[in-house]
Image (cartoon, grey):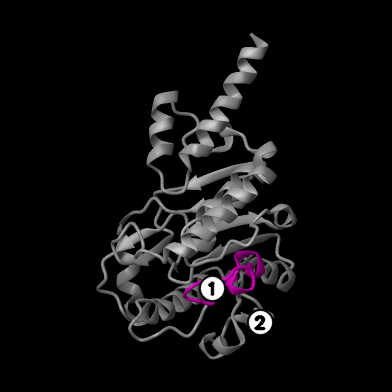
Amino acid sequence: MAHIINPFVADPSSDLYTAQPITFESMLQARQHVKGIMEVELLAAHFEEDTSVVPSGFQKAKALDRSVLSRHTFQKPVRLPLISDILQRLYEGSDADYLIYSNVDIGLYSGFYTRVNELIHEGYDAFIINRRRLEARYAEPSQLPDIYRDEGRRHPGFDCFVFHRSLFPKLKLEGICIGVPFIEIAFSQNLFALAKRFTLIENEQLTFHIGMEIFKKRAPKEYVAYNQTQFWNLVPQLFADMDLKKFPYARHIWPVRLIRWGLHPCIPIRLVMKLEWQRLKKRLRKA
């Protein structure tokens, strides 16, 4: 398997300034945990100016050469990478059967790759792993032993994606950029639609995020609006492959699953209602 992240030179005032080194070390330790059992490649996709932050043990992918600013004009320019470019580096930089992308502030518990391997052997060609939320008292990689003992609390959002490499050419990601909402919605909807066998791992101690917040700090509205438009542009390209049976919570009875979908930050209620209507029309035609 091959795992890619997007490291960058963070401002000392940012929580990523302390989170990234912990993420790096946790990934290295998780790989060490399976050394001699399986091969895990760690890759970094980054802009040229961020090369210095890539730690030893990570393969430097071809430098990113464009950003969301290449796709759209914003009042306040922020050079955010496109998720499609990051995944392209992952796909081209490794011949691994399974590919993993996670946010750079998502650390790994030591058993992460072991569990991923188990899920692969159970026959899943795509899955999402939800993180545990930890209190913001951790600030150094040396605290990882304490982190590993901390079970944290559940988090509903999506930030770690695992999929078979055969799915990559089929992904429809338009110009979605990372760092703002709708990246997780766009990525997850692709996996729901395209995977033959998908699962969501919601409550296992596999990944962590330092900070108890459920929602990130409010992102600039113009970037959220941009990603939102990009998402709804890609939906028609996936719609024929979308099947509510492959969505999380699909086995619940109608009112319960509708409530679960409506409350979930990564499942647009507008989309599932459209799919429910399509399914109802098919049933009525057969009746």
Q: Is residue 39 above or below residue 215?
A: below
Q: Is residue 256 above or below residue 4?
A: above
Residue 227 included in the magenta stretch of the image: no
Q: Quarter of the image for the C terminus: give it.
A: top right
- Mark linked to residue 80: 1
Residue in view at x 54 percent, y 62 percent: 113
Label 1 and label 2: CA atoms lie apart by 14 Å
Can the viewer see residue 198?
yes
Q: Is residue 221 left or right of residue 3?
A: left
Q: Which residue is mark 2?
A: 63
The span picked out in magenta is: 68-86
Q: Position of residue 41 (x, y in %)?
A: 63, 72
Q: Position of residue 33 (x, y in %)?
A: 50, 70
Residue in view at x 67 percent, y 12 percent: 286
Residue 71 included in the magenta stretch of the image: yes
Q: Give the residue type that dot 2 points to.
A: Ala
Q: Is residue 32 left or right of residue 63?
A: left
Residue in view at x 33 percent, y 73 percent: 145
Q: Secondary structure at mark 1?
A: loop
Query: In the rendered structure, are the residues bearing label 1 and label 2 in contact, judged by CB atoms less than 8 Å apart?
Result: no
